[in-house]
Structure formats: C-alpha cells, structure tokens
Image: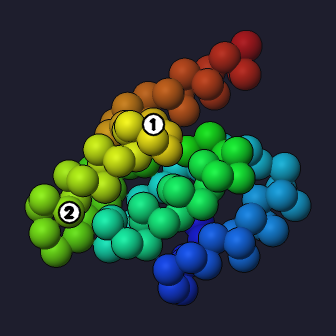
Amino acid sequence: MQREQRNGDFFKLQEKLDSLKRTQLIVAGIAANVCVESTVRDAMQLDYEVTLVSDGITTFDKTLLESAIRNTMLFFGDVSTTEEIMEALREHASCRAG
C-alpha cells in the first residue's frame, strides 16, 4: 500500500513499482474525483494496467464519484468491485498453485 500525500504524487510510487517490477495497480482511496483519478490517469499514461475498486473509493459528491468511475472505465483502466478483485486474485493464486 502506498499513500499519496498530494495530488500528482504518483511518480514517487512509480519508483517503488519499478523496483518491484510491477505493472498492474489496484487503486482505492478518497477524493475519487481528484487524487484517485489523478493516480489512475498517471498510471495509465505510464503504461500500467489499472483496476479501480469501485466500492473502495469515495468523495463528497455522488455525481463526482460516478464521473470518476465513468472516466476510468472509458479512458484509463478497468473498474471492479472488491469482491470481483478478490475472486480474480483467488483464481490466480489457485492457478499458480497448480
């Protein structure tokens, strides 16, 4: 987990992701229409595969929340619920276990 201290702080996270050789991000957080969406946009621009956790984000206005989700779906990455992500991770783990 990485905490973004301010809008546009993704590039600090990029260093860590690169050192771990990670190419996929699962994003959740508050201020969906500002910090979360900025992180999603930055990650997509740098060729990361992004999944936004639709029930793991929030903001002070429902319309802004829906807009952040829609923007992600249309332009920046995938959108899934926590349960959908957990199921995909379980399936991946069972495939690796063999």
Residue 30 visible in the snapshot: no
The residue carrying mark 1 is: 78
The quadrant the N terminus occupies is bottom right
The residue located at (12%, 61%) in the rendering is: 62
Residue at image location 48% in from the left, 66% down from the top? 38
Cα distance in 3D space between marks 2 and 1: 18 Å
**Up-down relation of residue 78 to residue 27 (above or below):** above
Tell which tag, 2 or 1, sits nearer the viewer: 2
Residue lying farthest top? Answer: 98
Q: Earlier in the sequence, mark 2 or mark 1?
A: 2
Q: Residue, x 35% and y 48% (percent of image)?
A: 71
Q: How many marks?
A: 2
Question: Is 26 on the left-hand or right-hand side of 69?
Answer: right
Front residue of 75 and 54:
75
Three-letter amino acid code at disc 1?
Asp
Amino acid type of the residue that numbered disc 2 sits on in the rendered structure: Leu
In the rendered image, the vertical position of residue 31 relative to residue 58, given as above or below: below
Instruction: Give SS at disc 1.
Output: strand
Give how far across and how far down residue 90 sits, in percent. Answer: 53, 29
| Dot label at residue 64 | 2
Residue 56 at x, y percent in the picture: 33, 56
Residue farthest along the left direction in this orientation: 62
- Report which quarter residue 59 is drawn in: bottom left
Lateral position of residue 75 relative to residue 15, left or right: left
Query: Where is residue 36, by image quadrant?
Result: bottom left
Rendered image coloring scheme = rainbow
Q: Is residue 46 visible?
A: yes
* Mark 1 nearby-residue class (10 Å; few <14, some 14–19, many ≥20): some
